[in-house]
Amino acid sequence: MTKFCLTVTCPSRRGIVAAISSFIAAEGCNITDSAQFDDIDNGRFFMRMSVVAETGAALEDLTSRFAEVADAFEMDFLFHDEATKMKVVVMVSRFGHCLNDLLYRVRIGALPIEIVAVISNHMDYQKVVVNHDIPFHYIRVTKQNKLEAEARILQVVEEAGAELIVLARYMQILSDGLCKKMSGRIINIHHSFLPSFKGANPYKQAFARGVKLIGATSHYVTADLDEGPIIEQDIVRITHAQSPDDYVSLGRDVEAGVLARAIHAHAHRRVFLNGNKTVVFPASPGSYSSERMG
């Protein structure tokens, strides 16, 4: 038996769920998990469905035959083979906590991805990456060579067949052109405080202000810096007795966890772009424990 994931986005109308369910049943498939959301405000419908093809139906055949249903409802849809891991390129600079966390989660099977390359503008993590049998690409970025560097980055992504770029504390601003070309396929992580602290040493700024909550936000990258559609967020509570070093340590932990959960959701096709926001369906029971791990 083959397991597929079907994702659907379309204008909201009566009969969508019935049409999809009827098609799945007629194809000799069984629905094992389904989530849907009807956004009344903008008239858009979103669905994610897990399907077991008990008759051995092929992905290409399901896709071809479903086109008639999709046309009737103006659907954007995709069938995905759940056994195929998403190929990911990770980009990092000099803070390695998110990279190391991702390498560990992938190694123990807690993330359904394959890291096909790591790109960095520094050499700090070359040995770590190579020791995981992953290609490491050093691409230096300056004001003068930015376009050339981004062309090399895209070359790595395309040659590796990657579907997703993860900025694991990559401290370079991507150009508008790259953001648009990879729209919905670049995930970033950054600290998020109330109030927000920008510039150098944000955790020291938070300590100086006596912040009681620090957190992190993972989002899709757009041309608007750190303002892309949010996928995942979390916070951790701070007390007056903790030091600036504690802030940094706790902040790094929450950053790593939030980024991993955002990637997990994206790789399981549970995230849908909805204008400036996202629709994020909950994890199914079979994957929830690994997603919350750590």
Image (cartoon, grey):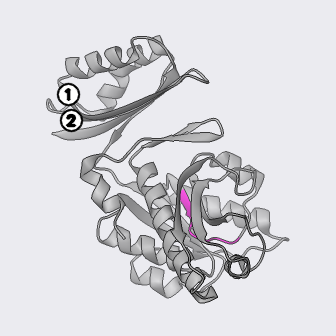
CA gap, disc 1 and disc 2: 6 Å
Q: In the figure, is residue 99 to the left or right of 142?
A: left
In this rendering, position of residue 14 left or right of residue 145: left
Residue farthest toward the right in the current orientation of the protein? 144
Residue extent of the magenta highlight: 165-171
What's the residue at 55%, 22% (across, down)?
40
Q: Position of residue 222 (x, y in %)?
A: 69, 50
Residue depicted at x 38% and y 45%: 282
Q: Nearer the viewer, residue 75 or 224?
A: 224
Above or below, 159 relative to 214: above
Tell me the quarter of the image containing the C terminus: bottom left
**What's the residue type where badge 1 is placed?**
Cys
Residue type at mark 2 is: Val
Asked whether residue 149 is drawn in magenta, I would say no
Nearer to us in this view, 118 or 246: 246
Query: Cβ–Cβ below 8 Å for labels 1 and 2?
Result: yes
Residue at 48% from the left image edge and 22% from the top image edge = 75
Residue of label 2: 52
For residue 254, the mark is none
Element assignment for label 2: strand
> Residue 223, image x and y in percent?
74, 51
Q: Mark 1 highlights which residue?
A: 29
10 Å neighbourhood of mark 1: few (<14), some, or many (≥20)? many
- Provide residue 122's location: percent of width, then percent of height: 64, 82
